[in-house]
Amino acid sequence: MRGFSKVLAVLLLGAGPGAAWADADHTQTLWTSWSNTTALSRDWSLVSDVQLRSNDDAEDLRNFIVRAGLSYALNPQLRMAAGFAYIDTYRPGSSTLTEHRSWQQLIASQRIGGCTFSERLRLEQRFIERAGAPDTYSDRLRLQGRVTMPLQDRDKPLERGAFAFLQDEVFFHLSHRQRLNGKLFDQNRLYAGLGWRFSPKLDVEAGYLNQLVLGRSVDTQNHALQLQISTKI
């Protein structure tokens, strides 16, 4: 996966329609997340995350997401994992929609000075409940790149203290996209912010996330404040 960041940059320039950023409907939401890694041995671990996302203007809960999986370290810089995810979408005055996903991923990481670069490739098999239409299945590809930089000593790996981060993720429909938005490109998430590492086992971060979602007829640009806690056991 070395060099994936260059590929990601090309995909961003080529796949994200420039006009959509300007013409999309705009929403403001709040996202919260807790992710955890529990070591089972030197190479094996359990990974999980729980997320809550609000609807527009943070008036009500829109999404509840729980994801869990098993991870294996192929080497110190490369891990693979697979698991399952459950997603509820709440709609005031209407029934809740549920999605089930199985997923597989590879995560590559490396350090240059004090900065950590990570690249993630994730495949998802989505079983989607839809409103006013039959349930459907779709495969999706997600490509994510992230850089984390310590703010105190930029030449040493971060053990404690403040850090800044920049992250981007691109989503592509691989199958049955005619049942969704009819396009190869699904969405893009650009995320940046600040965090504090309390210990090698606890990070807390907050930032701004810009989510562009292409719809069949109307695109949405979501401006989200995201709060995240990451733990290791």
Image (cartoon, grey):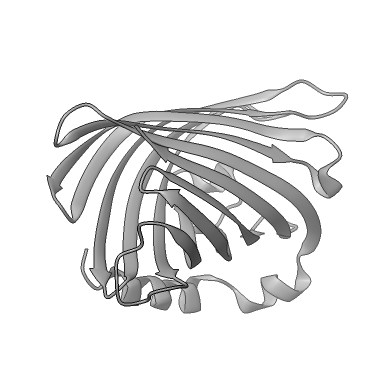
Q: Quadrant of the N terminus?
A: bottom left
Residue beneath the point at 38% across and 70% down: 8
Image coordinates for residue 225, horizontal then vertical, percent: 70, 55
Q: On the rendered structure, is 188 left or right of 4?
A: right
Q: Residue at x 26, y 74 (%)?
A: 112
194 relative position to 201: left or right: right
Choose between 211 and 206: the one closer to the eye: 206
Image spot of residue 145 (x, y percent): 39, 64
Q: Quadrant of the C terminus?
A: top left
> Number of marks in the image?
0
- Tell me: residue 221, above or below residue 65: below
Q: Tell me, yes or no, if residue 135 can be seen here.
A: no
Give how far across and how far down residue 201 sits, in percent.
38, 42
Name the spot of residue 100 as percent of width and height, x first: 49, 26
Quarter residue 44 falls in: top left
Residue 13 relative to residue 92: left or right: left
Q: Position of 55 compared to 8: left or right?
A: right
Residue 167 appears in the picture as rendered: yes
Residue appearing at x 41%, y 64% in the figure: 146
Q: Residue at x 65, y 30 (%)?
A: 130
Residue 45 quadrant: top left
Pick the front one: 129 or 28: 28
Question: Which quadrant of the view contains residue 24?
Answer: bottom right
Please, which residue is most extreme toward the left here? 75
